[in-house]
Amino acid sequence: LISVQATSIHLTGQASAINALTEGSGAGGIIRLQAQDITLDDGAQIKAETSGSGRGGHIQIESETLNLLGGSAIEANTEGSGEGGSISITASQALRLESPAGMNVPSGIRASTYDSGDGGYIKLISPLIVMDNGLVQAKTQGELSEGIANGAAGNITIETRQISLENGAQIDTSSRAGSNGTGGSVLIEASDSISVTGRGTNFPTAIFANTF
């Protein structure tokens, strides 16, 4: 268990990370962050990953504002036979995922599977969600495995008042090339509005739940 409680939590730079890695048969740990303001910038990461048969760890975040900027990421991926961990985020004021135009690996929240383990779910709760070239992804894809990925993609659930996607932002729970696993589902409950506009330098602005 990694548990951090503070007024604010700021991680900046690719060397800044909070990790819980599972490589064997044991279950992964829990990462729990509680703060008024949480900001990740310039490639900073929070990861709970599994590459063995053990279940991946979970990431739980409670804040007033959560900002993922400059290619930063929150990830609970699986590259083994173990079931992937889940990501649960509650931001009582706002959740923002923003990346510069043209960034190939944008700021994101990802719970994907690249092997036989099923991917975990992503649940986001916030009255305002702004995605400017940001990514929320729970896909299954075989690119990291020596064989074919058979794990099913996880589901994405979003509860909000208002959500906007622009400049190549994407919500994706798909079954991609190299995978026999099923894609997941996307459920968005927005009491006010859902906005999907424009495209980015490299990607369209979109919500995907496809099998390729």
Image: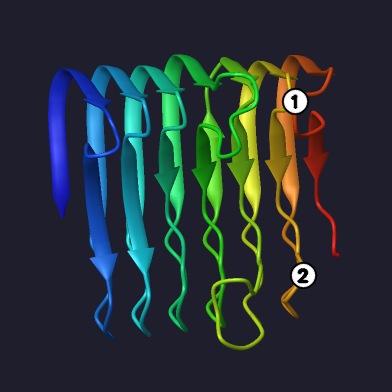
Residue 43 vertical position relative to residue 200 in the rendered view, above or below: below
How far from the left and from the top, in percent, is residue 71?
A: 47, 31
Q: Residues within 10 Å of mark 1 (few under 14, many from 20)?
A: few
Q: Nearer the viewer, residue 108 or 55?
A: 108
* Label 2: which secondary element: loop
Q: Tell me if 102 is positioned left or right of 10 in this view.
A: right
Separation of marks 2 and 1 at Cα, in angstroms: 23 Å
Q: Residues within 10 Å of mark 2 (few under 14, many from 20)?
A: some
Residue 140 vertical position relative to residue 109 in the rendered view, above or below: below
Q: Tell me if 61 is positioned left or right of 171 in this view.
A: left
Q: Residue at left 36%, top 26%?
A: 42
Q: How many marks?
A: 2
Q: Quadrant of the N terminus?
A: bottom left
Mark 1 or mark 2, which is nearer the start of the sequence?
Answer: 2
Dividing the picture into quadrants, the one containing residue 197 is top right
How far from the left and from the top, in percent, is residue 203?
A: 77, 34
Which three-letter amino acid code belongs to the residue tagged 2? Ala
> According to the image, what is the colour scheme of the structure?
rainbow
Disc 2 designates what residue? 177
How far from the left and from the top, in percent, is residue 14?
A: 30, 37
Dividing the picture into quadrants, the one containing residue 40 is top left
* Label 1: which secondary element: loop
Which three-letter amino acid code belongs to the residue tagged 1? Thr
Q: Nearer the viewer, mark 2 or mark 1?
A: 1
Q: Quadrant of the C terminus?
A: bottom right
Q: Which mark is residue 201?
A: 1
